[in-house]
Amino acid sequence: MQSKVLLSSNIPVQKLVVDFVADSLPQAKQLFCIAQLPNDGISIFTGDGEYLEPLPPSLSQFLSTCNTGWYSISETPFKPKPLIGQTSLEMELDRDFLLLRNIAAEDCNLFLFIQLKPFGFTKQMYLMADEKKQLERSIRGFVESFLRILHNDKEVLKTVAKGNSAAQQEIQEIKRQLSFQNQNYETAIVQFVQLIVNQLQEKYSIEIKMSRMFIDELKTYNRPFDQLEINLDKHIQIELNMALLRGDSEIVLTPTHLTNLQNTQAANVYINGDDLNLGRHAKTYKLLDRYEMAAQKALQNGLSVIGKNIGDYCSPSVSNASITDALNKHAKKMFELFNRFPDRWQLIRNEFRSVANIIEKENIRRKNSA
């Protein structure tokens, strides 16, 4: 955004707000900034410029009775006819316009409509109610901070219209403030997650570190934070088994550890030779853990749980034929381990057809030989 456009005192404040929000929120698809003027007049700017169409007849009543919150465009005076045949879920997903009301500006009162689509920072993700509230507060705070800057630097604004270099300094100050807020947010998130990591280190008696990529990924984490500890716990349970088998003394968290494991059951029994007494089943146990981990990685990357994808995510990678051969050789021991540990290896049990076929054959064989 050009500094003389952002700070010119000759430009209506509602246009400045529209430009500022559009520049700050790339996911803002449509914008309406409505100014109620002291003479009861109404002026509207959108992302395309001044709104020159006749004002909707019900606009004044809507502004006097509406609440801050999320709306479908069909629920506003700008498109009063609702879509016919929508389900309640579809109607809720259509509520992608955030209305912020009663934002005080010089000489007017602002109402801001912002369409945020996709809702979250990841495409196809929809925000939960508490995340919507967080967005409401954050956007209102940024806009009000911007308006305070305009108010406090009124004399600067007058000189900027003449090409004063203070405009660029003002832009840099706004960016500095936003950057400072982002840094504070990152620090708070890292400290919060570090508390969780400390608890998991104590729980499992293994050192857990956060990689730089993991920390960067936290900046755009948009799932409920009250589920983060549970999800990390599940990931650590899986990693712990593999780490102990490899003789590792630490676990390093990466962005994959933020993926959601709610549809799979993490292991709840941990490798300990004295407790498990695996004996001749140790190799089979390790093999199943290896395939389960590879299946998790394939699923997290949007791939189906089939032999080829599991083989690609094994370390080192193996062929589909090698996996089939190994499963056939270990069929009897797999059957016994599945019965012994009913909560383990849920992904390959339920999603990997090759495992299901082998277990089915082994079950039939045992019934016939009984």
Image (cartoon, rainbow, N blue to C red):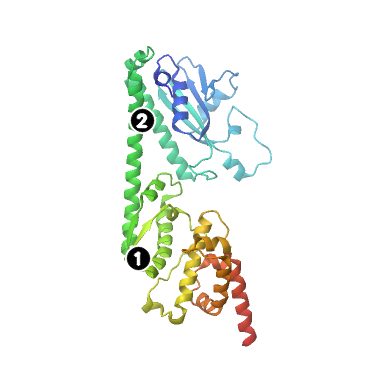
Q: Callout 1: 10 Å neighbours few (<14), some, many (20+)?
A: few
1 or 2: mark nearer the eye: 1
**At 39% from the left edge and 13% from the top edge, which residue is drawn?**
161
Is residue 170 or residue 77 the one in the foreground?
A: 170
Q: Visible in this render: residue 343?
A: no
Q: Position of residue 348 (x, y in %)?
A: 54, 66
| Residue beneath disc 2 | 175
**Residue farthest toward the right in the current orientation of the protein:** 85
Q: Vertical placement of 171 versus 186: above or below?
A: above
**Most foreground residue, 67 or 238:** 238
Marks 1 and 2, the one that precedes in the sequence: 2
The correct choice, above or below, for 19 with respect to 134 in the image is: above
Left-right relation of 101 to 74: left
The residue indicated by pointer 1 is 248
Dot 2 alpha-carbon crowd within 10 angstroms: few under 14, some 14 to 19, many 20 or more: few
User: Which of the pair 170/150 is nearer the observer?
Assistant: 170
